[in-house]
Image: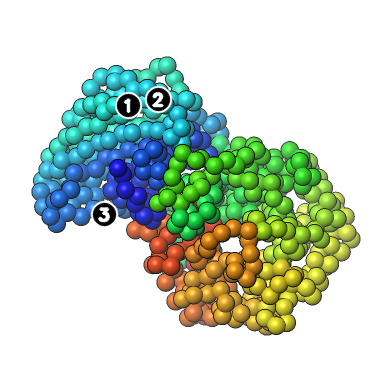
Amino acid sequence: MYDYPQIADHGMVGDLQTAALVSDAGTIDWWCTPRFDSPSLFASILDSERGGFCRLAADLDGTAGATIRQLYLADTAVLVTRFMAPGGVGEVADFMEPSLSATPTNRHRLVRIARVVRGSLPFSLVCRPRFDYGRAPHTLTLLDDGSALFRGPGTDLHVQASAPLTLHPDGGDVTARFTLQAGEVAAVTLTSDRSDHHTTRPLTGDQVRDSIEACRSFWHNWVRTSSYRGRWYEVVHRSAITLKLLTYAPTGAPIAAATMGLPEQIGGERNWDYRYTWIRDASLSVRVLIDLGFVEEAQAFRLWLRDRLHAGGTESGEPLQIMYRVDGDPHLTEEVLDHLEGYQKSAPVRVGNAAADQIQLDIYGEAADALAQAQDIGGVRGWQTFAGVLDWLAGSWDRPDEGVWETRGGRQDFTYSRLMTWVAFDRGIRMATAYSRPADYARWMGARDAVFNQIVERGWNPKQEAFVQHYDTDVLDASLLLMPRVGFVAPRDPAWLSTLDAMDRELVSDSLVYRYNPTASPDGLRGSEGTFNLCSFLYVEALARAGRLHQARYAFDKMLTYANHVGLFAEEIGPSGEQLGNFPQAFTHLALIGAALALDQELDRAGR
């Protein structure tokens, strides 16, 4: 029986097509391959018995004075788990060499290197893959003492171990026990592939060194292109690396999180699949990466987004769907995996996402804002397609939708959705003017002004003295913290400062921010949730832009204490400070970067 670690007890490694979570005990308990959204090989984080895992760690059970620490090598995605005991000090380094190929590949290699730097330590390896989310059987073939082949549906897993490891069968799994002395190194490689030709030669010592050095060099060179020189260098660049790891290199499509099914409330039903590309999340990620100087990632996403626009409308008649698979496939049929008990028995575990069929009008604003960051959105054809979307939106913006939080409680006239349609028209008009593109200026400007007036008249609640969630409520909504950033209001406009004060009273708890009050505004789901990390960082940015610098910096510093031991965040913070929801969450890390940039700018301005 493998106990559940805390969600936060993980680091992430990846190769820009897939990613794995490694616990601070040395266990890979999540890995889907050959893509982020492929079925899992290891998923013990969702079911400790059926999910499958691979553990490589020092045997410290019962050792008095033993401790374990985990860290990233600076400015890289090389994860090191250190084991310290009276008899010796050792470590396991986990990494995947990044692939920048524009062609997807079925072959992915996760390297695990064990070594001892002082004394001696006993180690153990347990590899128990469970294919297709634990639904499919597999066969095991031992190719020699250090090589095992697991064959399952769709892919194989080839495990190769260097001396002094000897792999032993354990039913359909493999194990090994070995001891390393100071200066000794052993490597285990996990290669997912579908091939009839599997080499039996493990990596040599030189190959191991070359592989880890190639990985380190890639990340060092990538971070070096950043323009950020602010006060939170390490924190910002860890978040940037995380966003890069969550991007599918062959298409440039960022995903929302590396996992599925991790709960927003332990034992609750808010357990979604986030391994897809949301137009909203991806567009906001592009904005912060541009602000840091990472222009290639932004351009790659714009090309992916342009292709989605060219592909035409959805079955519902909308020009865009709110999310897609990383290759642009719009089909994300949701199903429940009844055989998995869920993280700490948080069921149901869902794969796929039925929210893909929802109507969320805000995505057109986020898409337009992302496209507006470049001078070229795909040439003449690209502009014509984009202009056609705005022509459609001019006649379709004034209707209820499901809203930014994908609630399942019915459609409403959500203020944030209207806000972002205003952004769509505003950015379209700006691009048409700046680059002399043909456009129905009169219609777009008329729609933009009509949206603005409607938000001011119906989205403003006199009782609250604030902009509210939708037109028929007095409930507040933290998504509106983006109002100043998108330019709808000035950050020190009295109406905005009044809204910010209202959020302080109702949505903020010790600087942590709830999305909204689900009791006052039912969302169609049972249970509650924690504070939303995206909103907490947006709150910091709004405070900074409003000139409330002491409050902003205090809130930011406190938020950083909720990061895990290697600087990663999940989606939410629970009542005891625990991380909840899918992990790591792109939304959180992009908002952290935005908050840090805003604080840097405002603190510098105040200093001058």
Quadrant in the picture for residue 334 = top right
Instruction: Tell me the CA gap for discs 3 and 2.
Output: 34 Å
Query: Which sits in the foreground, 457 or 580?
Result: 580
Mark 3 element type: strand
Q: Residue at x 51, y 63 (%)?
A: 529
Q: Viewer-proximal residue, 575 or 461?
A: 575
**For marks 2 and 1 on the same chain, the one whose residue lies earlier in the sequence:** 2
Residue at image coords 32%, 38%: 54
Label 1 residue SS: loop
In-front residue for pair 22/553:
22
Please, what is the three-letter code of the amino acid marked with disc 1?
Answer: Gly
Note whether residue 271 is visible. Answer: yes
For the residue marked with disc 3, what is the amino acid?
A: Arg
Query: In screen coordinates, is 452 left or right of 32?
Result: right
In this view, 321 is above or below 485: above
Q: Which residue is mark 2?
A: 138
Residues at discs 3 and 1 in contact (Cβ within 8 Å): no
Which residue occupies the foreground of this view, 241 or 408?
A: 408
Which residue carries the number 1 mark? Answer: 172
Q: Position of residue 566 (x, y in %)?
A: 36, 56
Q: Position of residue 140 (x, y in %)?
A: 34, 22
Secondary structure, mark 2, is loop
Classify residue 445 as left or right of residue 373.
right
Q: Amino acid at mark 2?
A: His
- Between the residue at mark 3 and the residue at mark 1, the CA separation in whole angstroms equals 31 Å
The residue labelled by disc 3 is 69
